[in-house]
Image: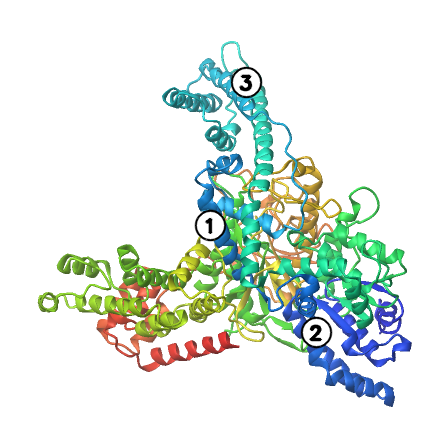
Amino acid sequence: RELADEPARRRIREDLRTTLVVEAAAGTGKTTALVSRIVAVLRRAPEEGGGTLDRIVAVTFTEKAAGEMKLRLRAEIERARGDARSGPAERARLDAALAHLEAARIGTIHSFCADLLREWPVEARVDPLFQVAAADQAEGLFDQAFDAWFQRTLNDPPEGVRRALRRRPRDGAQGPRDLLRGAAWKLAEHRDFTRPWRRDPFDRERAVDELIDRLAALADLGAEADREGDYLAQSLRNLDRYLAELRRREEVTGGRDHDGLEAELGELARWKEWRWRGSGKAFGADLSRAEVLAQRDRVKAELDAVLTAANADLAACLSRELRPPIEAYDALKARAGKLDFLDLLLCARNLLRSSRAVREELNLRFSHLFVDEFQDTDPLQAEILLLLAADDPAETDWTRARPVPGKLFVVGDPKQSIYRFRRAEVALYEATKARLVACGASVLYLSTSFRSAPSIQAAVNAAFAPLMQGGEGEGAASQAQYVALERFRDDPVDQPTVIALPVPRPYGDYGKISDFRVRQSIPDAVGAFVHHLIHAGRGSGSGERRWTVTERERPDQRVPLEARHICLLFKRFQTFGEDATRAYVRALEARRIPHVLVGGRSFHDREEVMAVRSALLAIEWPDDELSVYATLRGPLFALTDDVLLLYRDRLQRLHPLFEPDEAALDLAVEGGARPLREVAEALAVLGRLHRERNRRPIADTIGGLLDETRAHAGIAIWPTGEQALANVLRVMDLGRRFEAGGATSFRAFVERLEADAERGEVAEAPVVEEGTEGVRIMTVHRAKGLEFPVVILADPASPAVHQNPSRHVDPALGLWAEPLAGCVPAELVERRDEVLRRDREEAVRLAYVAATRARELLVVPAVGDARPGDGSSDGWLDVLHPVLYPAPRERRDARRCEDLGCPPFGTDTVLERPARCEADERDAVAPGEHAPMAGSHRVVWWDPSALDLDREPEAGLRQQRILQADAGAGAMAGAGAAAGAGDVASAGAMAGTGVAAGGRALGGELGQRGHEVWQEARQRAIR
């Protein structure tokens, strides 16, 4: 049958003389549409609106997308050549295109800009031999510039730096230096926005002094309380104690330290005591509780107002005072002949602005521009593209440029605009679209989605259509206009497509639903549910059916569901400074489910990476006895505390360069302390590596460490051996890249690793390739453009938006305003409501992108007792509640769903409630199939009692099974003890994987498997 949007698709292929803006909803085949347009251009002669491949530019969002586009373009060109309707001339044009495909300009906007700059380096005023600095290289240069500035500045810090140094860092920062460094890097990333931040008049000292007086008057009310244990009275007495301590300090120092007091007031504002209310109407003899609470609220509001003004003042100070390290960073790049990604865009934009000759040359050279993911375009990129498409080379203002009809073709979806932090705004997209339409462009909509099952589409349409209204009026352009997804295929008849996965234990100690408890409880439920999906129906006599799915490559064939078909999607991997994925990973590991973090930021928190980092510290600084001890005690050598302490006692020193007295060592060994020889051998390994570290490549030093300890064999039998090996190889690769960037010092590399570890930098090594086993664990941003048969949305308690507004951007004014060092600038304060609205709108789009990744099954965590819309939660998945929850009167009206492959369910979707909880089973959504409040689909609410919950991790069991078949009882005694203590790595090492085993080579299944996994990981790293 004809697709609902076939007229639009036909026009994309045939109307080559019109500028087209195509809005393609999720799963509608936007890349296919773009490729079909390119092929149509290649088939036709120039006088018919066609063109040759050398005159075409196609811009994509990532290098991976560019590679995939080339492959698809090749396939479509070959298909077109075989079309019987193709005449000789058309076939000849296609043959020529196929012959020159590898030279086609299909890539990212950054690679395109780099090509322009290399062609016109003099006009662009760049080094003709410039190199593009990778993200880590750019940050390394910035660190050099910042460190030099910071050391100089500490001698006489300016006002803003002085005040910032007194503040206690939050949000994972390690100290004041990192706070300032993070602020400076933010400014460096947006240095093309040159408008200074406004600094309003603010008498900080006077404001703080008056506030202290009001706080003291409030604290005095504590003495009027009738009851000693009253919570409100306690909060006031705590305030009084703080003020008394403040007065004592001021008497000692002889004055008021306003910088320090400003920092302390920020901590005071976060006291939980501000929420203590106590009970009863009366507070004191002549005071009502309402009067005291009203006065406290007024003082708290004054405190917040003073801090808001002080923070805005400090943000303005820092925005000026942090310019010198940015200028030094630019100078370092210039000396090194490097351009970072922003430089590529800035220099290319300036080149096009300043040189009419270049504009004329490029306008003649390129006949067609194709832009993918146009909703992710930032102001610089939009300016470059529209100047290239302009019909008048004399025009230098991109907002007035008129594209040549048919020259520009853009594809995007404003509903999937989720990169505001990278400058991409829906408002910019809509404004640019409006300009193109005013110049004669047409807007087409693709709505037929080939991806999701119709019932998933129905849920998505019902959830997001009311929230994406677009429309007219102030601020309306900041949200997309919803276009409903149209069905293409049929639903599976014997499986659910939308499942609400209940949180088993959502209640806190006080009988209320708690975000903290939700975060604690849901990972285990997700792990158990994934285990059910993979293993249901596999056992004989289980009475359950296997879950089946379709794959993108074989949409008409159902295959048994495997781990590789499942993806866990997170809003972000870090929540309140903690790794949000860790509990989910442990739940999967406890059930032996293969998995991989794609782009995880927990790289430096992995045990194998910490072990290697510790060893590198010991190699570089052998005098650092703590690092040496940690290395010997860790998984690489796995020596026990008693052995190391005995060695230290008998031979006095634990130093890699200290050669022990052989007689004393032999005497100790003869006395029964045989493991002391193993300590000496381990120290000798570290000593050799220390002496050779600056005479060999960094990667060779790391490789030598791993070879000496036979770490590849030990790591291979960890529960996540492949990922661990890939991470170790990633450290070696970091060493190679560090040296390739011009650095040769081993010490500098170790220091860089430590700095990255403090900031949580470096993504985890992605070892799982397409088609291999393993549950993917990704952020929504990483998953954009991808699809999976089964999608489970994770971390439901992650807030949709933060309390502080994120950023305000005004390209026309050249203004970029965002919090610096936790301080919100004045421009952002006065637009707080507007920016928070845009933040919430983007959160809606993020949830849309997440929900539309699913082909066959969408799983959303939910609390069975929750009442949607009551304001009790603000999680990022709350926008899906109307399409999950049944109407209040229908919460208990569940239909049995064994015919859908579900196990028999009970009657409650909450596994445990505390004794003081007011809700009970009658308030919960009943397990089974429901009709939700919104949408024509059906939702299955799972029964948490049907899940295999609370599975203990099987740490060490895999190692023990292999070792029992391969090692002696003596080795197993040590390994079993370590495994029983939960020390997985030590269990493997003590049984014969490292120097602690006397350097024995491993044999049998253990050694063979370790070697195989190591080689597989190496090959993946090479590829």
Q: Please indicate, yes or no, whether residue 490 appears anywhere in the rendered image.
A: no
**Quadrant of the frame with the N terminus:** bottom right
Q: Residue furthest top?
A: 286
Query: Residue 961: which numbered mark, if any?
Result: none
Query: Residue 147: which numbered mark, if any?
Result: 1
Is 541 situated left or right of 255 in this image? right
Which SS class for mark 2?
A: helix
Is 847 situated left or right of 86 in this image? left
Of tags 3 and 2, the one toward the viewer is 2
**Label 3 amino acid?**
Val
**In x, y percent, where is residue 561?**
58, 72
Q: Is residue 410 above or below residue 944?
A: below
Q: Provide the residue designation for mark 3.
A: 292
**In x, y percent, where is residue 388?**
79, 64
Residue that appears at 54% across and 19% down: 210
Q: Residues within 10 Å of mark 2 (few under 14, many from 20)?
A: many
Query: Residue 69: which numbered mark, if any?
Result: 2
**In x, y percent, where is residue 10?**
86, 72
**Label 2 amino acid?**
Met
Of tags 1 and 2, the one toward the viewer is 1
Q: CA distance from mark 3 to mark 1?
A: 50 Å
Which SS class for mark 1?
A: helix
Q: CA distance from mark 1 to mark 2?
A: 42 Å
Q: Residues within 10 Å of mark 1 (few under 14, many from 20)?
A: some
